[in-house]
């Protein structure tokens, strides 16, 4: 597992711990959950739009076939890990806010 995967895993566990910790801060935890939800959702949405409509099309048009395949082989695992972690954090925050 690379450093990016370890970092995203640590961030996801930290976010889950913050979301499901006892509510000692009162309304502050709900505000933090809303912020985490919006940031995770926006990151997943933005990454998906960028890779689908900008990065993927530019790479497909301007890279030779083998370079494109090599780049996609390295980029997509990190992309899917980012999307998966951000989606999981967003769903967990939503579940916390609306039980």
Image: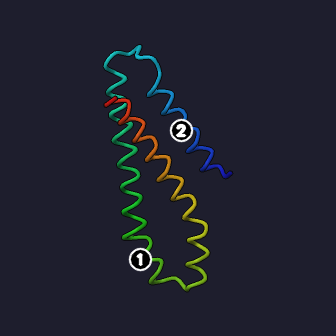
Who's the residue at 52% across and 39% down the image?
12
Dot 2 corresponds to which residue? 11
59 is higher (above) or lower (below) than 38: below
Q: In the image, what residue occupies the spot 52% across and 82% down? A: 63
Image spot of residue 37 (x, y percent): 36, 39
Q: Is mark 2 on a helix, strand or loop?
A: helix
Give the alpha-carbon distance from disc 2 to disc 1, as whole Å.
30 Å
Neighbours of disc 2 within 10 Å: few (<14), some (14-19), many (20+): some
Check the image and name the residue furthest to the front. Answer: 99
Q: Residue 68 carries which label?
A: none
Q: Which residue is drawn at 34% across and 35% down?
A: 35
- In primary-sequence order, the first of circles 2 and 1 is 2
Q: How crowded is mark 1: few (under 14 residues within 10 Å), some or many (20 or more)?
A: few
Total numbered badges shown on the rendered structure:
2
Residue 56 at x, y percent in the picture: 44, 73
Q: Where is residue 90 in the image (x, y as percent from the top left)?
A: 40, 42
Check whether the beta carbons of the residues at disc 2 and disc 1 lie within 8 A of each other.
Answer: no
Quadrant where the C terminus is found in the figure: top left
Name the residue at the bottom extreme.
64
Secondary structure category for the residue under label 1: helix
State the residue position of label 1: 57
* Residue lying at 40% horizontally and 50% vertically, measured from the top left: 43
- Residue 54: image quadrant is bottom left
Please say if 17 is above or below 37. Answer: above
* Location of residue 7 in the rendering, given as x and y in whole percent from the top left corner: 59, 43
- Colour mode of the rendering: rainbow
Q: Up-down: is 43 above or below 14?
A: below
Left or right for 88, reference 69: left
């Amino acid at each position: 597992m690379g450093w990016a995967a370890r970092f995203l895993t640590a961030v996801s566990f930290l976010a889950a711990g913050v979301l499901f910790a006892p509510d000692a801060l009162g309304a502050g935890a709900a505000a933090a959950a809303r912020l985490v939800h919006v940031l995770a959702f926006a990151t997943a949405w933005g990454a998906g739009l960028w890779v689908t409509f900008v990065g993927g099309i530019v790479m497909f048009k301007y890279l030779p076939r083998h370079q494109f395949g090599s780049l996609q082989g390295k980029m997509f695992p990190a992309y899917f890990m980012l999307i998966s972690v951000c989606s999981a954090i967003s769903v967990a925050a939503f579940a916390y806010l609306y039980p």
